[in-house]
Image (cartoon, rainbow, N blue to C red):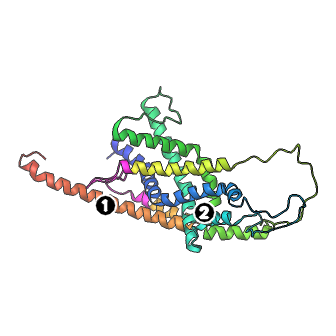
Amino acid sequence: MSETPTARRVNRDRPARFLHRLHFYAGLMVGPFLLIAAISGAFYALAPTIEKVVYADLLTVDPATAAVVGEERTYSGLGELPVRRWLSGLHQQLHLGEPGELYAELAASWLWVLALGGLYLWWRRVSAARRRDPGTRTRLWRAAPAPTGDTGRRRRSLNLHAVLGVWLIVAMLGLAATGITWSQRVGANVDAVVSALDWKAPKVDATLPPESPGAGRPASPAQADRVIAVGLGIAAIIVLGYRMWWLRRPTVRGTSVPGLPDVPSWRIVAGVVVFAATVGAFLPLLGMSMIGFLLLDLVLIGRSRARRRAVEKQREPAILSGGVP
């Protein structure tokens, strides 16, 4: 027996609906770690400016005689002073040592998945809007009209959430790639490559360089503002995601999970298990958490189906007796 058009459409949309739910689960549960990383990263970009304020009275070289009159401990070839070192530790491992490094690995491992998944969901949404009205030109900053009321507030949050994600997609992928190098598994391999190629930062050179005229040389472009903008943009994406969840939060018997099917697709389940096992060989936290989200999805599908069956059983006596269900 051939499938009806509705059944074919439902089966065709199953992978996208699961991706939507995975985006929801990961955003809700990994979001706090990403928020901490984004905000602490923005502060770290400000570290040189903060150092100038904190150590404004510190004088290490007499500008008149070039004599060394003081010293302050630095922590790398970049000349990190204690304040910048503290911000670096906060960003990398929350000052918790090895257990804290798991936070950075989890955040960086999921950032690229959330970014690419969100880009695909945005593309489907824009494509659907164009199919409904081929004459409409859907712009990046206005992916869909925003109605009034609670739904309107959620739609506006969704639009801004999606548009910021599209604008920052390249930056998020770059941050994910660099952040993954801090993970215990991949980071150890990167450290081995850096040591083999002798790419480590050189020690601080205390000798004065030869004289050279200061005029006629362009200054290096300041990029801290861009890094801060990216960090605050990612933080805004996360906050908007939580706002959408709050606006569609579940009622007493409802659920806020988008697109739960009647029955799970075991083909999708098998595909996710294979993908999680493959990726988990390189990023264990990503693989394990993805399997955890898959199990959560199966539990919620089962609860939703049981709830519908209970409602149907309550309606049957009323229908048989001629009452209003």
Q: Can you name the residue that lies furthest to the bottom here?
A: 98
Region in magenta: 246-269
The part of the image, by quadrant, that contains residue 193 is bottom right
User: Distance from label 1 to label 2 (Cα)?
Assistant: 39 Å
Q: Can you name the residue that lies furthest to the left here?
A: 321
Residue 185: x percent and y percent? Answer: 62, 70
Residue 72: x percent and y percent? Answer: 76, 68
Q: Which mark is residue 26?
A: none
Residue at horizontal 38 percent and vertical 51 percent from the top: 246
**Would you place residue 272 above or below residue 129 in this image?**
below
SS class of the residue under badge 2?
helix
Residue 11: x percent and y percent? Answer: 39, 48
What amino acid is labelled 2 in the image? His
SS class of the residue under badge 1?
helix
**Would you place residue 9 above or below residue 231 in this image?**
above
Query: Which residue lies under the disc numbered 2?
Result: 91
Is 295 magenta? The answer is: no
Alpha-carbon neighbours of circle 1 within 10 Å: few (<14), some, or many (≥20)?
some
Of residue 75 and residue 261, the one placed in the foreground of this image is: 75
Alpha-carbon neighbours of circle 2 within 10 Å: few (<14), some, or many (≥20)?
many
What amino acid is labelled 1 in the image? Gly
Residue 27: x percent and y percent? Answer: 47, 55
Which of the marked residues, 1 or 2, is nearer the chain's N terminus? 2
Query: Which residue lies under the disc numbered 1?
Result: 302
The part of the image, by quadrant, that contains residue 267 is bottom left
Is 253 magenta? The answer is: yes
Could you tell me how many numbered marks the image carries? 2
